[in-house]
Image (cartoon, grey):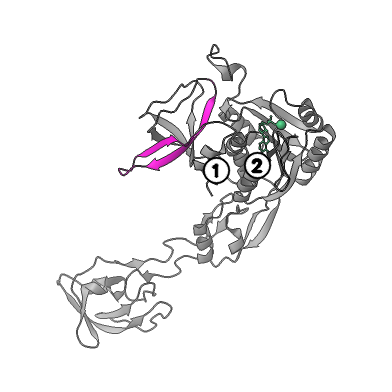
Amino acid sequence: MTQNNNPSPSANHFISVSEVQKRIIKDTEAIKGTEQIALRQALGRVLAKDIIATFDTPPCDNSGMDGYAFKRSDITDQPTLTLKIAGQSFAGHPYNGEISSGEAIRIMTGAQVPEGVDTVVMQEHTEVKGEDTVTITTIPKAFANVRKAGDDLKTGQTFLARGKKISPTDLAFLATQGIAEVRVSRKIRVAFFSTGDELRSIGESLGPGDIYDSNRYSLYGLLKNMDVEMIDMGVIPDDRQLIEEAFTTAGELADAVITSGGVSVGEADFVKETLEKLGQINFWKISMKPGKPLAFGTLGNSLFFGLPGNPVAVIATFYQFVQPALKRMKGQEIVLPLQIKAKTTELLKKRPGRTDFQRGILEQSDSGELTVRNAGMQASHVLTAMSQANCFIIIPAESGSIEVGEMVDVQPFEGLTS
Ligand code: AMP
Ligand code: MG
Protein backbone atom coordinates (compact mmCIF):
# COMPACT_ATOMS: atom_id res chain seq x y z
CA MET A 1 0.00 0.00 0.00
CA THR A 2 1.34 3.39 -0.96
CA GLN A 3 1.77 5.95 1.77
CA ASN A 4 -0.68 8.81 1.55
CA ASN A 5 2.03 11.45 1.71
CA ASN A 6 2.68 10.56 -1.91
CA PRO A 7 -0.21 12.24 -3.78
CA SER A 8 0.43 10.45 -7.08
CA PRO A 9 1.63 6.98 -6.25
CA SER A 10 1.32 5.61 -9.76
CA ALA A 11 3.73 8.23 -11.04
CA ASN A 12 6.53 6.94 -8.81
CA HIS A 13 6.11 3.31 -7.90
CA PHE A 14 2.97 2.09 -9.54
CA ILE A 15 1.89 1.59 -13.10
CA SER A 16 -1.77 2.14 -13.96
CA VAL A 17 -4.14 -0.62 -15.05
CA SER A 18 -4.77 1.05 -18.41
CA GLU A 19 -1.04 1.45 -19.06
CA VAL A 20 -0.49 -2.25 -18.34
CA GLN A 21 -3.44 -3.17 -20.59
CA LYS A 22 -1.94 -1.05 -23.37
CA ARG A 23 1.50 -2.64 -23.04
CA ILE A 24 0.11 -6.17 -22.92
CA ILE A 25 -2.16 -5.66 -25.92
CA LYS A 26 0.71 -4.05 -27.86
CA ASP A 27 2.88 -7.12 -27.24
CA THR A 28 0.15 -9.61 -28.12
CA GLU A 29 -0.40 -10.85 -31.65
CA ALA A 30 -3.13 -13.01 -33.12
CA ILE A 31 -1.91 -16.60 -33.44
CA LYS A 32 -1.20 -17.79 -36.94
CA GLY A 33 -2.88 -21.17 -37.54
CA THR A 34 -6.43 -21.61 -38.81
CA GLU A 35 -8.77 -24.57 -39.26
CA GLN A 36 -11.86 -25.33 -41.32
CA ILE A 37 -14.73 -26.54 -39.14
CA ALA A 38 -18.40 -27.46 -39.41
CA LEU A 39 -20.87 -24.64 -38.82
CA ARG A 40 -22.17 -25.85 -35.44
CA GLN A 41 -18.64 -26.32 -34.11
CA ALA A 42 -17.91 -22.70 -34.98
CA LEU A 43 -20.03 -21.25 -32.15
CA GLY A 44 -17.78 -19.05 -30.01
CA ARG A 45 -14.82 -19.38 -32.39
CA VAL A 46 -13.23 -16.43 -34.19
CA LEU A 47 -13.49 -16.05 -37.97
CA ALA A 48 -10.16 -16.19 -39.78
CA LYS A 49 -11.61 -14.88 -43.06
CA ASP A 50 -14.26 -12.41 -44.15
CA ILE A 51 -17.50 -14.10 -45.19
CA ILE A 52 -19.08 -12.86 -48.41
CA ALA A 53 -22.68 -13.35 -49.54
CA THR A 54 -22.82 -15.43 -52.73
CA PHE A 55 -26.48 -14.66 -53.37
CA ASP A 56 -29.14 -12.21 -52.17
CA THR A 57 -31.05 -13.05 -49.02
CA PRO A 58 -33.93 -13.28 -48.97
CA PRO A 59 -33.40 -14.86 -52.39
CA CYS A 60 -36.77 -13.63 -53.73
CA ASP A 61 -39.49 -11.08 -52.94
CA ASN A 62 -41.80 -12.74 -50.41
CA SER A 63 -44.82 -11.94 -48.34
CA GLY A 64 -44.58 -10.63 -44.78
CA MET A 65 -48.24 -11.49 -44.09
CA ASP A 66 -50.97 -13.99 -44.77
CA GLY A 67 -53.32 -12.24 -47.22
CA TYR A 68 -53.71 -11.43 -50.89
CA ALA A 69 -51.11 -10.20 -53.35
CA PHE A 70 -52.27 -7.78 -56.03
CA LYS A 71 -51.06 -4.99 -58.25
CA ARG A 72 -51.35 -1.67 -56.42
CA SER A 73 -51.92 0.22 -59.68
CA ASP A 74 -55.24 -1.65 -60.01
CA ILE A 75 -56.47 0.84 -57.42
CA THR A 76 -57.08 4.41 -58.45
CA ASP A 77 -59.29 6.26 -55.96
CA GLN A 78 -61.99 3.74 -55.12
CA PRO A 79 -62.39 2.98 -51.33
CA THR A 80 -62.55 -0.79 -51.82
CA LEU A 81 -61.52 -3.14 -54.58
CA THR A 82 -62.86 -6.51 -55.58
CA LEU A 83 -60.45 -8.84 -57.38
CA LYS A 84 -60.68 -12.30 -58.87
CA ILE A 85 -58.55 -14.90 -57.04
CA ALA A 86 -56.33 -16.38 -59.76
CA GLY A 87 -54.39 -18.86 -57.62
CA GLN A 88 -52.29 -19.29 -54.55
CA SER A 89 -48.66 -18.96 -53.43
CA PHE A 90 -47.71 -20.87 -50.27
CA ALA A 91 -44.30 -21.01 -48.57
CA GLY A 92 -42.27 -23.46 -50.63
CA HIS A 93 -45.04 -23.68 -53.28
CA PRO A 94 -44.85 -20.60 -55.51
CA TYR A 95 -47.53 -19.60 -58.00
CA ASN A 96 -46.21 -20.08 -61.49
CA GLY A 97 -49.13 -18.94 -63.68
CA GLU A 98 -49.94 -15.64 -65.35
CA ILE A 99 -51.67 -12.82 -63.47
CA SER A 100 -53.86 -10.34 -65.27
CA SER A 101 -55.00 -6.91 -64.19
CA GLY A 102 -57.87 -7.21 -61.71
CA GLU A 103 -56.61 -10.48 -60.28
CA ALA A 104 -55.23 -11.37 -56.84
CA ILE A 105 -53.22 -14.29 -55.46
CA ARG A 106 -53.93 -15.89 -52.11
CA ILE A 107 -50.52 -15.68 -50.36
CA MET A 108 -48.97 -16.89 -47.09
CA THR A 109 -46.11 -15.47 -44.99
CA GLY A 110 -42.76 -16.34 -46.57
CA ALA A 111 -44.31 -17.35 -49.90
CA GLN A 112 -42.84 -15.95 -53.10
CA VAL A 113 -44.57 -12.84 -54.45
CA PRO A 114 -45.17 -13.76 -58.09
CA GLU A 115 -44.40 -11.63 -61.15
CA GLY A 116 -47.25 -9.27 -61.94
CA VAL A 117 -48.20 -8.31 -58.35
CA ASP A 118 -46.36 -5.96 -56.01
CA THR A 119 -48.41 -5.40 -52.85
CA VAL A 120 -49.89 -7.65 -50.15
CA VAL A 121 -53.02 -6.82 -48.20
CA MET A 122 -53.35 -8.62 -44.91
CA GLN A 123 -56.17 -11.11 -44.59
CA GLU A 124 -57.83 -9.04 -41.82
CA HIS A 125 -58.35 -6.21 -44.33
CA THR A 126 -60.25 -8.34 -46.82
CA GLU A 127 -63.61 -10.02 -47.25
CA VAL A 128 -64.05 -13.17 -49.28
CA LYS A 129 -67.50 -13.63 -50.80
CA GLY A 130 -68.03 -16.75 -52.80
CA GLU A 131 -65.29 -19.00 -54.09
CA ASP A 132 -63.12 -16.83 -56.20
CA THR A 133 -63.36 -13.12 -55.38
CA VAL A 134 -61.81 -11.08 -52.63
CA THR A 135 -62.72 -7.51 -51.60
CA ILE A 136 -60.00 -5.35 -50.15
CA THR A 137 -61.66 -3.24 -47.45
CA THR A 138 -58.65 -1.28 -46.26
CA ILE A 139 -56.34 -0.29 -49.08
CA PRO A 140 -52.65 -0.75 -48.19
CA LYS A 141 -49.81 1.47 -49.42
CA ALA A 142 -48.01 0.40 -52.58
CA PHE A 143 -45.50 -2.43 -51.92
CA ALA A 144 -46.88 -3.00 -48.40
CA ASN A 145 -46.00 -6.31 -46.71
CA VAL A 146 -43.55 -7.34 -49.41
CA ARG A 147 -40.08 -8.31 -48.18
CA LYS A 148 -37.67 -7.53 -50.98
CA ALA A 149 -35.00 -9.91 -52.27
CA GLY A 150 -31.63 -8.77 -50.83
CA ASP A 151 -33.22 -6.87 -47.90
CA ASP A 152 -30.77 -8.61 -45.57
CA LEU A 153 -27.76 -9.42 -47.76
CA LYS A 154 -26.73 -8.41 -51.26
CA THR A 155 -24.57 -10.66 -53.43
CA GLY A 156 -20.90 -9.81 -52.89
CA GLN A 157 -21.43 -8.13 -49.53
CA THR A 158 -19.04 -8.96 -46.64
CA PHE A 159 -21.46 -9.82 -43.90
CA LEU A 160 -19.17 -11.23 -41.22
CA ALA A 161 -15.68 -9.87 -40.85
CA ARG A 162 -12.52 -11.68 -39.90
CA GLY A 163 -12.01 -11.35 -36.15
CA LYS A 164 -15.72 -11.66 -35.33
CA LYS A 165 -16.54 -14.11 -32.58
CA ILE A 166 -19.30 -16.32 -33.91
CA SER A 167 -22.53 -15.87 -31.96
CA PRO A 168 -25.77 -17.89 -32.14
CA THR A 169 -27.13 -15.19 -34.49
CA ASP A 170 -24.05 -15.58 -36.68
CA LEU A 171 -24.71 -19.34 -36.98
CA ALA A 172 -28.15 -18.46 -38.33
CA PHE A 173 -26.67 -15.75 -40.55
CA LEU A 174 -24.19 -18.24 -42.06
CA ALA A 175 -26.97 -20.80 -42.47
CA THR A 176 -29.05 -18.32 -44.54
CA GLN A 177 -26.21 -18.45 -47.06
CA GLY A 178 -26.07 -22.25 -46.97
CA ILE A 179 -22.53 -22.19 -45.54
CA ALA A 180 -21.67 -25.59 -44.05
CA GLU A 181 -18.08 -24.91 -42.91
CA VAL A 182 -16.07 -21.86 -41.89
CA ARG A 183 -12.40 -21.07 -41.43
CA VAL A 184 -11.59 -20.01 -37.88
CA SER A 185 -8.44 -19.28 -35.91
CA ARG A 186 -7.10 -22.44 -34.32
CA LYS A 187 -7.73 -22.78 -30.59
CA ILE A 188 -5.02 -21.26 -28.47
CA ARG A 189 -3.19 -23.52 -26.01
CA VAL A 190 -2.90 -22.22 -22.50
CA ALA A 191 -0.78 -23.91 -19.81
CA PHE A 192 -1.32 -23.01 -16.19
CA PHE A 193 -0.06 -24.00 -12.78
CA SER A 194 -0.08 -22.85 -9.19
CA THR A 195 3.04 -22.27 -7.13
CA GLY A 196 3.35 -22.59 -3.38
CA ASP A 197 4.53 -25.06 -0.74
CA GLU A 198 1.27 -24.60 1.21
CA LEU A 199 -0.94 -25.76 -1.67
CA ARG A 200 -2.57 -29.18 -1.71
CA SER A 201 -4.63 -30.59 -4.56
CA ILE A 202 -8.18 -31.83 -4.04
CA GLY A 203 -8.01 -35.43 -2.79
CA GLU A 204 -4.96 -34.78 -0.62
CA SER A 205 -5.35 -34.12 3.09
CA LEU A 206 -4.46 -30.75 4.57
CA GLY A 207 -1.50 -30.57 6.94
CA PRO A 208 -1.02 -27.70 9.39
CA GLY A 209 -0.89 -24.39 7.50
CA ASP A 210 -1.91 -25.99 4.21
CA ILE A 211 -4.75 -24.82 1.96
CA TYR A 212 -6.31 -26.28 -1.11
CA ASP A 213 -5.20 -24.90 -4.43
CA SER A 214 -8.29 -23.02 -5.61
CA ASN A 215 -6.70 -20.80 -8.27
CA ARG A 216 -6.36 -23.64 -10.74
CA TYR A 217 -10.12 -23.99 -10.55
CA SER A 218 -10.98 -20.33 -11.17
CA LEU A 219 -8.47 -20.36 -14.02
CA TYR A 220 -10.00 -23.56 -15.40
CA GLY A 221 -13.45 -21.91 -15.41
CA LEU A 222 -12.25 -18.65 -16.90
CA LEU A 223 -10.29 -20.46 -19.61
CA LYS A 224 -13.13 -22.88 -20.33
CA ASN A 225 -15.41 -19.90 -20.97
CA MET A 226 -12.82 -18.59 -23.41
CA ASP A 227 -12.87 -21.84 -25.36
CA VAL A 228 -9.13 -22.48 -25.26
CA GLU A 229 -7.18 -25.75 -25.09
CA MET A 230 -5.98 -26.13 -21.53
CA ILE A 231 -2.85 -27.75 -20.19
CA ASP A 232 -3.27 -28.07 -16.42
CA MET A 233 0.19 -28.56 -14.92
CA GLY A 234 -0.91 -28.85 -11.31
CA VAL A 235 0.81 -27.42 -8.26
CA ILE A 236 4.53 -26.70 -8.37
CA PRO A 237 6.25 -26.37 -5.00
CA ASP A 238 8.55 -23.45 -4.20
CA ASP A 239 11.59 -25.32 -5.47
CA ARG A 240 14.15 -23.83 -7.85
CA GLN A 241 14.63 -26.97 -9.93
CA LEU A 242 10.95 -27.88 -10.24
CA ILE A 243 9.94 -24.31 -11.03
CA GLU A 244 12.53 -24.11 -13.79
CA GLU A 245 11.37 -27.41 -15.29
CA ALA A 246 7.72 -26.36 -15.17
CA PHE A 247 8.41 -23.00 -16.81
CA THR A 248 10.46 -24.64 -19.56
CA THR A 249 7.82 -27.28 -20.33
CA ALA A 250 5.00 -24.74 -20.28
CA GLY A 251 6.90 -22.40 -22.59
CA GLU A 252 7.38 -25.23 -25.08
CA LEU A 253 3.81 -26.53 -25.01
CA ALA A 254 1.64 -23.46 -24.93
CA ASP A 255 0.81 -20.20 -26.66
CA ALA A 256 0.25 -18.63 -23.25
CA VAL A 257 1.38 -19.61 -19.77
CA ILE A 258 -0.43 -18.49 -16.63
CA THR A 259 0.85 -19.01 -13.10
CA SER A 260 -0.46 -17.84 -9.76
CA GLY A 261 1.49 -17.01 -6.64
CA GLY A 262 5.10 -16.23 -6.05
CA VAL A 263 5.26 -12.81 -7.67
CA SER A 264 4.98 -10.63 -4.56
CA VAL A 265 7.95 -8.82 -3.13
CA GLY A 266 9.77 -10.99 -0.61
CA GLU A 267 8.72 -14.16 -2.37
CA ALA A 268 11.40 -16.82 -2.86
CA ASP A 269 13.70 -15.05 -5.27
CA PHE A 270 14.28 -17.97 -7.59
CA VAL A 271 10.84 -17.52 -9.23
CA LYS A 272 11.87 -14.11 -10.46
CA GLU A 273 15.40 -15.31 -11.15
CA THR A 274 14.19 -18.31 -13.14
CA LEU A 275 11.83 -16.27 -15.24
CA GLU A 276 14.52 -13.73 -15.98
CA LYS A 277 16.87 -16.53 -16.98
CA LEU A 278 14.37 -18.36 -19.19
CA GLY A 279 12.43 -15.53 -20.73
CA GLN A 280 11.89 -11.83 -21.00
CA ILE A 281 9.71 -10.81 -18.14
CA ASN A 282 8.60 -7.47 -16.66
CA PHE A 283 7.66 -7.35 -13.01
CA TRP A 284 5.12 -4.62 -12.39
CA LYS A 285 3.59 -3.12 -9.31
CA ILE A 286 0.19 -2.15 -10.60
CA SER A 287 -1.95 0.57 -9.05
CA MET A 288 -4.71 -1.94 -8.51
CA LYS A 289 -6.45 -3.54 -5.58
CA PRO A 290 -6.66 -6.49 -5.49
CA GLY A 291 -3.77 -7.53 -7.72
CA LYS A 292 -0.74 -5.34 -7.17
CA PRO A 293 2.07 -7.58 -8.47
CA LEU A 294 2.08 -8.95 -11.99
CA ALA A 295 4.75 -10.54 -14.14
CA PHE A 296 4.32 -10.32 -17.90
CA GLY A 297 6.56 -11.20 -20.81
CA THR A 298 7.60 -14.06 -23.03
CA LEU A 299 8.71 -17.55 -22.15
CA GLY A 300 9.95 -19.47 -25.19
CA ASN A 301 7.39 -18.80 -27.90
CA SER A 302 4.60 -18.15 -25.46
CA LEU A 303 3.25 -15.16 -23.58
CA PHE A 304 3.71 -15.39 -19.85
CA PHE A 305 1.39 -14.06 -17.14
CA GLY A 306 2.51 -14.42 -13.53
CA LEU A 307 -0.59 -13.57 -11.51
CA PRO A 308 -0.59 -12.87 -7.79
CA GLY A 309 -1.57 -15.69 -5.43
CA ASN A 310 -4.63 -14.40 -3.64
CA PRO A 311 -7.76 -15.97 -5.14
CA VAL A 312 -9.64 -12.72 -5.84
CA ALA A 313 -6.50 -11.08 -7.22
CA VAL A 314 -6.15 -13.96 -9.68
CA ILE A 315 -9.67 -13.41 -11.01
CA ALA A 316 -9.34 -9.60 -11.11
CA THR A 317 -5.99 -9.63 -12.92
CA PHE A 318 -7.14 -12.35 -15.30
CA TYR A 319 -10.16 -10.22 -16.17
CA GLN A 320 -8.21 -7.00 -16.71
CA PHE A 321 -5.09 -8.36 -18.40
CA VAL A 322 -5.18 -12.03 -19.40
CA GLN A 323 -8.68 -12.14 -20.92
CA PRO A 324 -8.03 -9.13 -23.22
CA ALA A 325 -4.68 -10.62 -24.29
CA LEU A 326 -6.15 -14.06 -24.97
CA LYS A 327 -8.97 -12.48 -26.98
CA ARG A 328 -6.35 -10.68 -29.03
CA MET A 329 -4.45 -13.96 -29.50
CA LYS A 330 -7.67 -15.57 -30.72
CA GLY A 331 -7.92 -12.84 -33.33
CA GLN A 332 -10.77 -10.87 -31.74
CA GLU A 333 -11.00 -7.15 -32.34
CA ILE A 334 -12.82 -5.94 -29.24
CA VAL A 335 -10.87 -7.04 -26.22
CA LEU A 336 -11.22 -4.73 -23.20
CA PRO A 337 -14.00 -5.25 -20.65
CA LEU A 338 -17.16 -3.18 -21.13
CA GLN A 339 -17.44 -0.30 -18.65
CA ILE A 340 -20.65 1.54 -17.77
CA LYS A 341 -21.88 3.95 -15.06
CA ALA A 342 -24.19 3.12 -12.18
CA LYS A 343 -25.46 4.90 -9.08
CA THR A 344 -24.26 3.62 -5.71
CA THR A 345 -26.90 2.70 -3.16
CA GLU A 346 -24.39 2.07 -0.36
CA LEU A 347 -21.28 3.76 0.97
CA LEU A 348 -18.29 2.21 -0.79
CA LYS A 349 -15.32 2.42 1.57
CA LYS A 350 -11.92 3.19 0.11
CA ARG A 351 -8.63 4.84 0.99
CA PRO A 352 -6.70 6.88 -1.60
CA GLY A 353 -3.85 4.84 -3.07
CA ARG A 354 -4.50 2.24 -5.72
CA THR A 355 -7.46 1.80 -8.08
CA ASP A 356 -10.02 -0.44 -6.43
CA PHE A 357 -11.78 -3.23 -8.29
CA GLN A 358 -14.46 -3.82 -5.71
CA ARG A 359 -16.86 -6.70 -6.02
CA GLY A 360 -20.36 -5.33 -6.60
CA ILE A 361 -23.92 -6.24 -7.39
CA LEU A 362 -25.35 -4.35 -10.35
CA GLU A 363 -29.12 -4.08 -10.50
CA GLN A 364 -31.77 -2.23 -12.44
CA SER A 365 -34.43 -0.36 -10.47
CA ASP A 366 -38.10 -0.39 -11.46
CA SER A 367 -37.59 2.96 -13.18
CA GLY A 368 -34.76 1.47 -15.25
CA GLU A 369 -31.89 3.15 -13.40
CA LEU A 370 -28.70 1.12 -12.95
CA THR A 371 -27.65 0.88 -9.33
CA VAL A 372 -24.74 -0.85 -7.66
CA ARG A 373 -23.96 -2.04 -4.15
CA ASN A 374 -21.24 -3.82 -2.26
CA ALA A 375 -21.19 -7.61 -2.67
CA GLY A 376 -19.61 -8.28 0.73
CA MET A 377 -16.26 -8.20 2.49
CA GLN A 378 -13.67 -6.68 0.17
CA ALA A 379 -10.53 -8.69 0.80
CA SER A 380 -8.38 -10.44 -1.75
CA HIS A 381 -8.48 -13.82 0.03
CA VAL A 382 -12.29 -13.79 0.40
CA LEU A 383 -14.21 -15.56 -2.36
CA THR A 384 -17.66 -14.95 -0.81
CA ALA A 385 -18.14 -11.44 -2.26
CA MET A 386 -16.52 -12.47 -5.54
CA SER A 387 -19.04 -15.30 -5.82
CA GLN A 388 -22.00 -12.99 -5.03
CA ALA A 389 -20.82 -10.25 -7.38
CA ASN A 390 -21.89 -9.66 -10.96
CA CYS A 391 -19.58 -6.71 -11.60
CA PHE A 392 -16.41 -4.93 -10.61
CA ILE A 393 -16.88 -1.42 -9.25
CA ILE A 394 -13.88 0.63 -10.30
CA ILE A 395 -12.87 3.44 -7.98
CA PRO A 396 -9.96 5.60 -9.18
CA ALA A 397 -6.62 5.52 -7.34
CA GLU A 398 -6.79 9.00 -5.84
CA SER A 399 -10.43 8.66 -4.76
CA GLY A 400 -11.54 8.11 -1.18
CA SER A 401 -14.86 6.49 -0.19
CA ILE A 402 -17.85 6.88 -2.50
CA GLU A 403 -21.00 8.29 -0.94
CA VAL A 404 -24.50 6.94 -1.55
CA GLY A 405 -25.96 8.42 -4.74
CA GLU A 406 -22.65 9.03 -6.52
CA MET A 407 -22.06 7.60 -9.98
CA VAL A 408 -19.29 5.01 -10.35
CA ASP A 409 -17.70 3.04 -13.16
CA VAL A 410 -18.80 -0.57 -13.32
CA GLN A 411 -17.68 -3.55 -15.39
CA PRO A 412 -20.53 -6.08 -15.74
CA PHE A 413 -18.97 -9.54 -15.74
CA GLU A 414 -18.50 -11.45 -18.96
CA GLY A 415 -17.63 -15.09 -18.43
CA LEU A 416 -17.36 -14.76 -14.66
CA THR A 417 -20.91 -15.54 -13.61
CA SER A 418 -21.41 -18.70 -15.63
P1 AMP B 1 1.86 -15.50 -2.94
O1 AMP B 1 1.59 -14.53 -4.06
O2 AMP B 1 2.45 -16.77 -3.41
O3 AMP B 1 2.60 -14.84 -1.86
O4 AMP B 1 0.42 -15.86 -2.37
C1 AMP B 1 -0.42 -14.88 -1.80
C2 AMP B 1 -1.55 -15.56 -1.05
O5 AMP B 1 -2.34 -16.30 -1.93
C3 AMP B 1 -1.10 -16.51 0.03
O6 AMP B 1 -1.98 -16.41 1.12
C4 AMP B 1 -1.21 -17.87 -0.64
O7 AMP B 1 -1.39 -18.91 0.26
C5 AMP B 1 -2.43 -17.67 -1.49
N1 AMP B 1 -2.40 -18.53 -2.65
C6 AMP B 1 -1.37 -18.65 -3.52
N2 AMP B 1 -1.66 -19.55 -4.48
C7 AMP B 1 -2.90 -20.01 -4.20
C8 AMP B 1 -3.74 -20.99 -4.82
N3 AMP B 1 -3.35 -21.61 -5.92
N4 AMP B 1 -4.95 -21.23 -4.28
C9 AMP B 1 -5.34 -20.57 -3.17
N5 AMP B 1 -4.59 -19.65 -2.55
C10 AMP B 1 -3.37 -19.37 -3.03
MG1 MG C 1 3.50 -18.37 -2.54
Residue behind mark 1: 334
Within 10 Å of the Cα at label 2, are there few (<14), some (14-19), or many (20+) other Cα atoms? some
Residue in the foreground of this view, choosing between 61 and 101: 61
Q: Is residue 99 left or right of residue 217?
A: left
Q: Nearer the viewer, residue 325 or 333?
A: 325
Q: Quadrant of residue 309?
A: top right
Q: Which residue is mark 2?
A: 214
- Is residue 412 at all visible to an observer of this figure? no
Q: Using residue 229 as the reference point, say whether residue 171 is left or right of it.
A: left
Whether label 1 lies within 8 Å of ligand 1 gets the answer no
Is 389 above or below relative to 70? above
Residue found at the far bottom of this picture: 131
The residue shown at (54%, 16%) is: 8
229 sits to left or right of 55? right
Is 244 above or below relative to 264?
below
x, y (%) of residue 69?
Answer: 30, 75
Q: Which residues are magenta?
A: 353-376
Is 326 covered by the magenta stretch? Answer: no
Q: For the residues carrying marks 2 and 1, which lies nearer the camera in this image?
A: 2
Dot 1 amino acid type: Ile
Q: Is mark 2 within 8 Å of ligand 1?
A: yes
Which residue is at 36% across, 72% downward?
109
Residue 141, image x and y in percent? 24, 65
Tell me the SS state at disc 2: loop
Residue 352: x and y in percent read 50, 20
Query: Is residue 356 shown in magenta?
Result: yes
